[in-house]
Image (cartoon, rainbow, N blue to C red):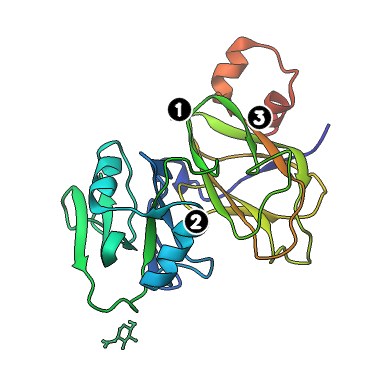
Amino acid sequence: MKKVIFLLLVVLQLDKTFEWGFKNGVLHNSIWLEQAAGVYHRESRNGKYKLTYREAKAVCEYEGGKLATYEQLEEARKIGFHVCAAGWLHKGRVGYPIVKPTFNCGFGKKGIVDYGYRLNKSERWDAYCYNPNVKECGGVLTEQERIIKSPGYPNEYENDQICYWHIRINYGQRIYIQFLEMDIEEDTDCLSDYFEIYDSYDDVHGLVGRYCGDELPDDIISTGNVMTLKFLTDGSITGGGFQIKYTAVDPPSKMEDEGSKTSNVETAYSLY
Ligand SMILES: *[C@@H]1O[C@H](CO)[C@@H](O)[C@H](O)[C@H]1NC(C)=O
């Protein structure tokens, strides 16, 4: 039986989920819905607000899509697509979709925050792509149990990818993560290709670990009911990919009522 890592992190984060955060001085979005109605958000591999119009177009085209139109972004927004980061749209317009305005984002109203058609196409923003046939890479997962695979698995994953999976289960439940398969290009600090797990709504707070290589990491249990998984690959050398399983775990009190203490998860809880 493998050891289980506990995230004795900030108790604060249990109830108060941080949706926004600054990273390199730029407000980073929470990832509510990675993709809707064929529209998705992309940032440069070097971080937020690093793409010129031409580069943004190239990012979408590289993946077989196009920059989204304002109308496509609005359609996606209507079904819940919300990102707090301005990105290039079709014909050099810039904006971002707000479903739930907050103090930091959206100027207090729902809708597309529209920066208009930019005269200066060398400005640097993120990108909103439209591609109804986009390959499976990330998403919002709300099932009680699910296997997450690297894109294309069991084939090798591709270069230059960023995928986010946002796991969100019932309030009060926790997320139990097991690594089933692991083959990611290995280097000392996992700088080239890596898989990251965050014990929070976004990829700013609560980094649990960064993984590469082919050793199976220990199991993980979240502190709350949300986690963010990120997979990033660079421009060279790929690997076999990964398979990870998550399972929703009910709070310990309920499990004690049910009596048995046989599984790893329950044992883990009794230690906690
Ligand atoms: C256009 O934007 C870039 C990046 O912000 C800036 O460096 C450049 O000076 C701008 N050009 C003009 C003509 O304003």
Which residue is nearer to you in this view: 132 or 32? 132
Q: Residue at x 66, y 53 (%)?
A: 158
**Residue 191: which quarter of the image?**
bottom right
Q: Earlier in the sequence, mark 3 or mark 1?
A: 1
Q: Looking at the picture, how far across and down is residue 116, in whole percent?
A: 19, 65
Viewer-side label of 3, 1: 1
Badges 2 and 3: C-beta atoms under 8 Å apart? no
Q: Looking at the picture, how far across and down is residue 6, in whole percent?
A: 66, 42
Residue 167 seen in the current view: yes
Residue with the mark numbered 1? 170
Q: Earlier in the sequence, mark 1 or mark 2?
A: 1
Kind of residue at badge 3: Tyr
Q: Residue at x 77, y 45 (%)?
A: 182
Task: Judge whether 95 appears above or below 101 on screen.
Answer: below
Which residue is nearer to you in this view: 7 or 218? 218
Q: Earlier in the sequence, mark 2 or mark 3?
A: 2
Q: Residue at x 49, y 44 (%)?
A: 134
Crowd tier of the residue under label 1, counting other residues whose Cα lies within 10 Å: few below 14, some 14–19, many 20 or above: some
Residue with the mark numbered 2? 205
Q: Residue at x 73, y 66 (%)?
A: 189
Residue 217 seen in the current view: no
Give the distance between the C-alpha atoms of the residues marked 2 and 3, in whole angstroms.
24 Å
Q: Looking at the picture, how far across and down is residue 63, in whole percent?
A: 51, 53
Viewer-side label of 2, 3: 2
Q: Which label is found at residue 269?
A: 3
**Residue 28: which quarter of the image?**
bottom left
Give the distance between the C-alpha atoms of the residues marked 1 and 2, in whole angstroms.
20 Å
Left or right: residue 224 versus residue 159 is left
Left or right: residue 30 versus residue 106 is right
Give the distance between the C-alpha atoms of the residues marked 3 and 1, in whole angstroms.
18 Å
Which residue is nearer to you in this view: 219 or 260? 219
Ligand 1 located in image quadrant: bottom left
